[in-house]
Image: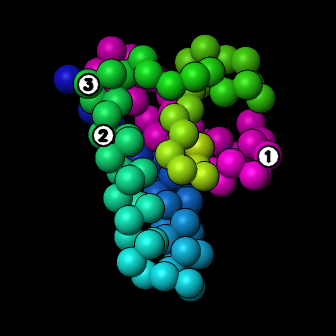
Amino acid sequence: MVRINWTQLALSDLKGVHEYIANDSIRYAQITVNKIYSRVESLKKQPNSGRIVPEFEDSSIKELIEGNYRIVHYLVGEDRIDILRIYHSARKLDKNRLK
């Protein structure tokens, strides 16, 4: 089974998502973060899932969509996936801000 590695940037993004939504609803913030975690956990069983991030055209960098969020991940090898960033779908992705 694949191991999931959250980068510091992705963890910071997730914290920001929670804080932003919690300004209106703590309950909805928790629900949203839990859905993102669940979606990431699905990568353990299906590590090749997701689409290639169109901004990068790099087949090793993919994304999953959960609600309004893009979960950008990188398949490091057969046994590890790095979660690089969590972006709101309205924001433009910048390759220089992935690592």
- 2 left or right of 24 in image: left
Residue underneath mark 1: 92
Q: Is residue 61 magenta?
A: no
Residue underneath mark 2: 41
Q: Secondary structure at mark 3?
A: loop
* Quarter of the rendering occupied by the N terminus: top left
Q: From mark 1 to mark 2, how far is it between C-alphas?
A: 25 Å
User: Magenta span covers which residues?
Assistant: 71-99
What color scheme is it? rainbow
- Of the pair 98 and 29, the residue shown nearer to us: 29
- 65 left or right of 79 in image: right
Is the Cβ of the residue at disc 3 closer than 8 Å to that at disc 1?
no
- Of the pair 92 and 6, the residue shown nearer to us: 92
Q: Residue at x 38, y 70 (%)?
A: 30
Amino acid type at image mark 3: Lys
Q: Secondary structure at mark 1?
A: loop
Residue 53's place in the image compared with 30, above or below, is above
Residue underneath mark 3: 45
Q: Earlier in the sequence, mark 1 or mark 2?
A: 2
Residue 77 drawn at (x, y percent): 38, 17
Q: Residue at x 41, y 61 (%)?
A: 33
Q: Secondary structure at mark 2?
A: helix
* Quarter of the rendering occupied by the C terminus: top right
Amino acid type at image mark 2: Glu
Residue 56 drawn at (x, y percent): 74, 25
Q: From mark 3 to mark 2, how far is it between C-alphas?
A: 8 Å
Q: Residue at x 55, y 74 (%)?
A: 21
Q: Is residue 85 magenta?
A: yes
Instruction: Say few, some or many: other residues with alpha carbon within 10 Å of mark 2 (under 14 / 14 to 19 / 20 or more).
Output: some
Total marks in image:
3
